[in-house]
Amino acid sequence: MTDNSVRLAVRAGILMLALLGATACQNVKPKAADKPQPAPSVETQRQQREAKRLQQCQQELAALQKINPERYQDNQRAFDSLMSGASQYAGLRARVNDDTQETVDALYRYKVSRLCAEIEQSVLIGLAERGEQVK
């Protein structure tokens, strides 16, 4: 894959995960026409935090490329695969029942959180090792 196609795939994956979060816990309730717009819900705030965390994860992955190129390659493949799977799932999500949606949504949130934690740890270890080499 070229850098541009990887970036597009990552952006599509981020969008799909954000959309998954947007629909995962949403209960559709009719709104009265005269009600003012409420403040952002807890769910909306959670979705924004998740999107921000995913962007931070992508930035840390880019930093890892300079710190540990081998580890970067492994994590980049895992990240691309995860985003691709999330994108495919988002296309099928509306066709499965609510219990399946909740389960698979949670699975993707977990996998993203775990991969991002691994990336963050790799960056920290790499930087610490470099710092230890300075005398």
Image (cartoon, rainbow, N blue to C red):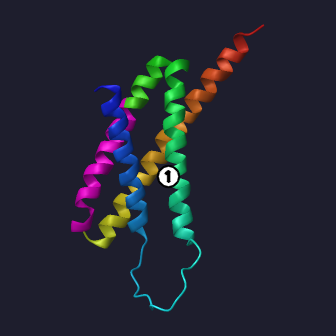
Given the current orientation, which residue lies at the most extreme top position? 135
Give the vertical position of 27 relative to 131 (above or below).
Answer: below
Q: Which residue is mark 1?
A: 51
In this view of the protein, which residue sits in the foreground, 57 or 122? Answer: 57
Position of residue 54 measured from the top left corner of the image (x, y, whole percent): 49, 46
Q: Residue at x 38, y 60 (%)?
A: 20
Give the vertical position of 103 relative to 87 (above or below).
Answer: below
Residue type, label 1: Ala
Position of residue 90 measured from the top left corner of the image (x, y, whole percent): 29, 57
Position of residue 61 measured from the top left corner of the image (x, y, whole percent): 49, 31
Tell me which secondary structure the magenta stretch mostly adopts. Answer: helix
In this view of the protein, which residue sits in the foreground, 34 or 128? Answer: 34
Position of residue 33 measured from the top left corner of the image (x, y, whole percent): 45, 90
Q: Residue at x 47, y 40 (%)?
A: 115
Q: Residue at x 33, y 70 (%)?
A: 99
Please tell me in which quadrant of the rendered image residue 3 appears: top left
What is the quadrant of the N terminus in the image? top left
Which SS class for mark 1? helix
| In the image, residue 89 lies in the stretch drawn in magenta | yes
| In the image, residue 99 lies in the stretch drawn in magenta | no
Please tell me in which quadrant of the rendered image residue 81 appears: top left
Highlighted magenta segment, given as a residue range: 77-95
Give the vertical position of 15 relative to 94 (above or below).
Answer: above
